[in-house]
Amino acid sequence: MAIAHSNTRTEVPDGALLVSCGGEKKYVDLNSLNAVPVQGSVVNGKGEKSDIDIHGVPLADVIKGAGFDPNNAAAVKVTADDEFSAELSGDEVNEAGKAYLVGEDDGSMRLVVFGDSNAKRNVRNVVSVEISLK
């Protein structure tokens, strides 16, 4: 079973992210996007608060970097290399200070969503972003 599952995983080049919309797929070089300070707190399922103070890229800017318009998004699904995913509404993606991709020490990317009562949408090892249009 594990072998079959590994064949369905999305593979992306190092430093890149696969962004898809309406059947069109593009790779985004994350190093080509402007990182901004990302500061705030997230809360896990146990109610424990973690402070974040790092640089990252707003999720809307990642979508723009792929040549898509985040304002046309009804929903955005962010998926990890193990197929774990989280969904954000288009409004959340476009809300300033809400959703970011931040770099981890191992070079992978993590989705950070501020304002959730449980940080389940803080997806680690992000490899793809899928946009559903309005």
Image (cartoon, rainbow, N blue to C red):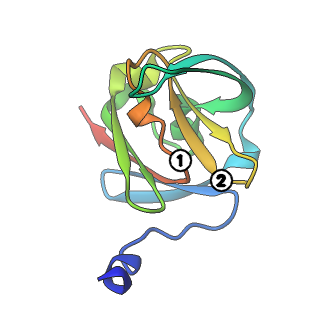
Furthest-left residue in this view: 134
Please tell me how crowded label 2 is: few (under 14), some (14-19), or many (20+) other residues with Cα within 10 Å. Answer: some
| Amino acid type assigned to the residue bearing label 2 in the image | Ser
The residue at 41%/78% (across/down) is 6
Where residue 75 sits: x, y (%)? 30, 34
Position of 99 compared to 38: left or right? left
The residue at 45%/27% (across/down) is 44
Where residue 61 sits: x, y (%)? 58, 32
Q: Which residue is mark 1?
A: 124
Q: What is the distance, in whole Å, between disc 2 and disc 1 at their CAs?
A: 8 Å
Image vertical order of residue 47 relative to residue 76, above or below: above
Where residue 126 sits: x, y (%)? 52, 51
The residue at 70%/45% (across/down) is 104
The mark that comes first in sequence, 2 or 1, is 2
* Circle count: 2
Which label sits on residue 108? 2
Position of 7 compared to 64: left or right? left
Position of 122 compared to 107: left or right? left
Question: Which image quarter holds the N terminus?
Answer: bottom left
Instruction: Confirm or deny contact between disc 2 and disc 1 (CB under 8 A).
Output: yes
